[in-house]
Amino acid sequence: MRCALFFVGGILGFLLLGGNPGEARGISFDFGPMDVLVRQEMASGGIPAVAVGLLLPDGQTLSRVYGSADVEQDVPAAADTLFAMGSVSKVFTALGVLKYLEEDRITLEDPVSAYFPGYPEGERISLCQLLQHTSGVAEVTKIPAWSADPARDWTPQEALALFSKEPLEFEPGQRAQYSNSPFIILGILLERLSGRSYERFVREDLAAPLGMTTLRLGSQRDIMPHRARGYALEGGRLINAPPESPVSAYASGGLMATAEDLAKLGKAFLPGVLLSEQTIAAMISPAELSDGSVFSIPLEDGEATFGMGLEVFTWHEQVVPTKNGAISGYSALFLAHPSSKTAVAVLTNLSDSGRAAQRIARKAAALVSSGALPE
């Protein structure tokens, strides 16, 4: 499989900007249509809280927050409420790897064995394949020892030792299959390259340039001020979500932030903020398999593929970098619409509410882009 750095026609050259934090603060934006949809989704889906972060065409950011961050204590969700984002964390991990690519510290064709000597089949797996879900590395969440104890704070090294013993699920580059394990490998790689913890690297080298102040690695043990409590539905009844360790999720799904901060991730698609135009183009290019074909998933209203650490949708003939996330008690969705210089982040504190988050995100994207991206 080739992992070329090439330009995707029409995607770049108009990309996203960031702005000041806060909710509305005099910014002219009509939340009315979104308010209606969010309240409908909350009522029909039993969602305690929804937070929507928006990146506007003029570069400013704002948020709208609904419902309860803590049902038992009757604490309303607010602009500073933290939500877990699950696999949206993979976007940050991918950005970190690509940052070191631009510093000539790595190449995307480097084998895993170059950084993890002795890793089984590591000489046949490239960093690019880890980023694009084409590596064949076994999915850690399917391993009985892991799935039997989701609340345990597995260290990245323990996770690596666990899934590295499993056979490859397919020949590297032969096909694409979503997996969390490759991003645990990449998180450890970032720690080795930076000489810092994954959380510190992400906060200092990625979040800070984007203007994000709330991004952090979650923990069940640590006190996290303003954290929304996570919930699930059981037989239609709201319950506290079963524990699942964000420490174990690590670089594949352990980060948390406010919705407005997460919307600032859209700035990562602006050349020169974190990455060059060429590298951004590579990040959102379709995953290419070893036979030269491009991985694609047909959808009712378009098609999707894996980029590096994210999914890329062709929606209304426009390229939309996006990433959904889920961890027990939370669902998330981030999408960017480069042609209108906008981005949307939707965070909820309910398991399995991803479809609702997607519908809300599409409505928000249509509104924030002033109809440039139809629903």
Image: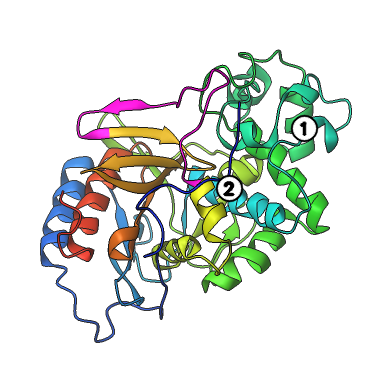
Can you identify the residue that label 2 sits on?
254
Q: Is residue 360 left or right of residue 215?
A: left
Q: Is residue 129 above or below residue 91?
A: above
Tell me the kind of residue under disc 2.
Gly
Residue 63: x and y, percent?
Answer: 32, 69
Write down the region rendered in magenta.
283-302
How many numbered callouts? 2
Q: Can you tell which quarter of the image residue 166 is in?
A: top right
Q: Which of the pair 249/174 is nearer the observer?
A: 174
- Residue 304 visible within the image: yes
Q: Residue 290 in magenta?
A: yes
Pick out the residue farthest to the right.
117
Residue at (14, 53) in percent of width and height: 37
Q: Is residue 309 above or below residue 12?
A: above
Identify the main secondary structure in magenta.
loop
Query: What's the mark number on residue 18?
Result: none
Give the class, few, some or many, for how many residues have Cα within 10 Å of label 1's Cα (few <14, many ≥20). Answer: many
Residue 227: x and y, percent?
Answer: 48, 61
Secondary structure beneath label 2: loop
Residue at (58, 33) in percent of width and height: 180
Can you identify the residue that label 1 sits on?
112
Q: Which of the pair 170/333 is nearer the observer?
A: 170
Q: Earlier in the sequence, mark 2 or mark 1?
A: 1
Residue at mark 2 to residue at mark 1: CA–CA distance? 23 Å
Residue at (15, 62) in percent of width and height: 35
Tell me the kind of residue under disc 1.
Val
Secondary structure beneath label 1: helix
Residue 363: x and y, percent?
Answer: 19, 53
Q: Is residue 293 left or right of residue 4?
A: left
